[in-house]
Amino acid sequence: MILDCVYSGINILIPSICPVCGRHPAVHPHPVCRSCAGALQSPASGIRTTAVNLRAVWSCCWYHGKSAECVRLLKYGGKRKMMNVFNEMIGSFLAGKPDLDAAELIIPVPVHWSRLHGRGYNQALLIARSVSETASIPISRNGLIKIRNTPPQAGITKKRRIRNLKDSFLAPDRLSLVGKSVLLVDDVITTGATMETCAAELLKAGVREVLGFTIAKTPLSQRTENRKQRTEDRKWKKRI
């Protein structure tokens, strides 16, 4: 409470500029301005994706515009505080999704140790923690690990993505997973290759079923929009 008051006071005296629009002051505890935070709205029914090896994948919003910029800031920009924005979105979204409440365990999509060292955190784990706190479902932080580093997936076909990801994930503690309903969590779903590959390894380890959750989904039907998103993603990746 005291820290919140201190940060609020600092924000009033020396307001930081919203990193999304670059125009308006950010409003504590959000790292973005009111306008940009207000633009991050989930569709009323959410976004449901059918994927191989998963019962369904649910996403809060589309990966474009300000939503995409906020995800990039979290994923590539080192802005962990972006979770203050996503926490509210996740809380509102999960309130109407009883299917996800059926999960017994949450597993974040892992990153390779070399990428974790460079970035400092796994954004999927931060999202998983938010889901866990909201839905009161425990997390298995090492339920799935990435044992092989893979090239960036942005801008390539699903077939190539799956080929890149082959034999890169491992469920080291299979006994703790047998018979469980698992919620697999990531930041964005595009072709579904990463979620499907992770789910296949979990099912092989004895998991009963796999559900999926992401902050955003790339609008695959909008090819021109996707090319723009891939270009922006590459720009962000060059910064790190």
Image (tube, rainbow, N blue to C red):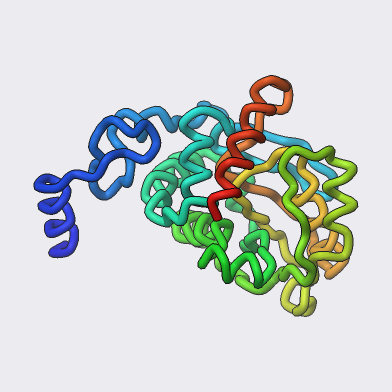
Residue at image location 73% in from the left, 42% down from the top: 56
User: Which quadrant does the N terminus fall into?
Assistant: bottom left
In the rendered image, is residue 208 in sight?
yes
Name the one closer to the observer, 173 or 189: 189
On the rendered structure, is 132 left or right of 224? left
Residue at image location 65% in from the left, 70% down from the top: 114
On the rendered structure, is 118 left or right of 181? left
| Vertical position of residue 78 compared to residue 105: above or below | above
Q: How many marks?
A: 0
Residue at image location 64% in from the left, 23% down from the top: 225
On the rendered structure, is 1 left or right of 36? left
Residue at image location 80% in from the left, 40% down from the top: 156
| Vertical position of residue 7 compared to residue 92: above or below | below
x and y percentages locating residue 70 in the rendered image: 46, 41
In the rendered image, is residue 46 in sight?
no
| Vertical position of residue 6 compared to residue 223: above or below | below
x and y percentages locating residue 158 in the rendered image: 84, 40
| Vertical position of residue 143 compared to residue 99: above or below | below
On the rendered structure, is 222 left or right of 121? right
User: Which quadrant does the C terminus fall into?
Assistant: bottom right
Q: Quadrant of residue 64?
A: top right
Name the one closer to the observer, 203 or 95: 203
x and y percentages locating residue 66 in the rendered image: 46, 31
x and y percentages locating residue 209 in the rendered image: 78, 56
